[in-house]
């Protein structure tokens, strides 16, 4: 069975998409900063594909009057008409920063305030713990008979 013309159009379009989009398009090439930090871009890739065509049927006949056999009807197959197309959209989503004994994902979207708050939660807990420990220490020292002035000086010296 002969290959249909639409198959060639679809194969060409799909091969072009395959050549354009691969894993390196989504997770980009790493870039190293002078301080040793490595920055890796991460993107979102979307693509669409469409193909279509029409073939005139062989039922269309044209009367060939110049035929020697008395103007006999001759069937003529008209050509195939079709097209295909594809579109690719690449949008940066985030940058992964690896270095200084930590890994951070920095989103490109400005509306990521919730993510920023979640990143600060561990630091907030550390500060609250430190403050509570200092207050407990101060109370224990007051019970042991130290004056408030002495405790303030010790805290300032830390």
Image: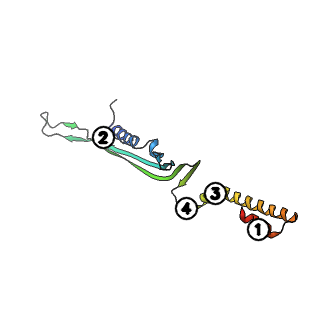
**Which residue is pictured at 52% across the width and 61% down the height?**
110
The answer to which quarter of the image holds residue 55 is top left
Q: Residue 22: image x %, image y %?
A: 44, 41
Q: Position of residue 53 (x, y in %)?
A: 34, 44
Cβ–Cβ below 8 Å for labels 2 and 3? Answer: no
Residue furthest top as drawn: 1
Q: Which circle marks residue 152 in the picture?
A: 1
Instruction: Name the N-terminal-most of marks 2 and 3.
Output: 2
- Tell whether label 1 touches label 3 (CB within 8 Å): no
Which residue, given by chain and number where applicable, does mark 3 sit on? 118
Q: In this orientation, which residue lies closer to the viewer: 76 or 124?
A: 124
* Label 4 crowd bin: few (<14), some (14–19), many (20+), radius 10 Å: few
Dot 1 or dot 2, earlier in sequence: 2
Residue at (57, 51) in percent of width and height: 104
- Of residues 65 and 11, the one nearer the viewer is 11
Between the residue at mark 2 and the residue at mark 3, the CA separation in whole angstroms equals 64 Å
């Amino acid at each position: 069975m002969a290959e249909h013309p639409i198959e060639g159009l679809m194969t060409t379009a799909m091969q072009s998409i395959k050549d354009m989009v691969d894993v390196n398009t989504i997770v980009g090439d790493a870039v190293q900063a002078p301080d040793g930090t490595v920055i890796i871009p991460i993107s979102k890739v979307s693509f669409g594909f469409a193909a279509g065509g029409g073939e005139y049927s062989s039922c269309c006949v044209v009367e060939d009057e110049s035929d020697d056999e008395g103007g006999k009807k001759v069937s003529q197959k008209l050509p195939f008409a079709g097209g295909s197309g594809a579109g690719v959209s690449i949008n940066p989503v985030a940058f992964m920063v690896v270095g200084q004994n930590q890994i951070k994902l920095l989103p490109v979207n400005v509306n990521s305030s919730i993510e920023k708050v979640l990143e600060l939660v561990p630091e907030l807990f550390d500060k609250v713990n430190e403050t509570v420990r200092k207050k407990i220490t101060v109370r224990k020292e007051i019970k042991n008979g130290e004056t408030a002035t002495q405790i303030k000086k010790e805290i300032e010296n830390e």
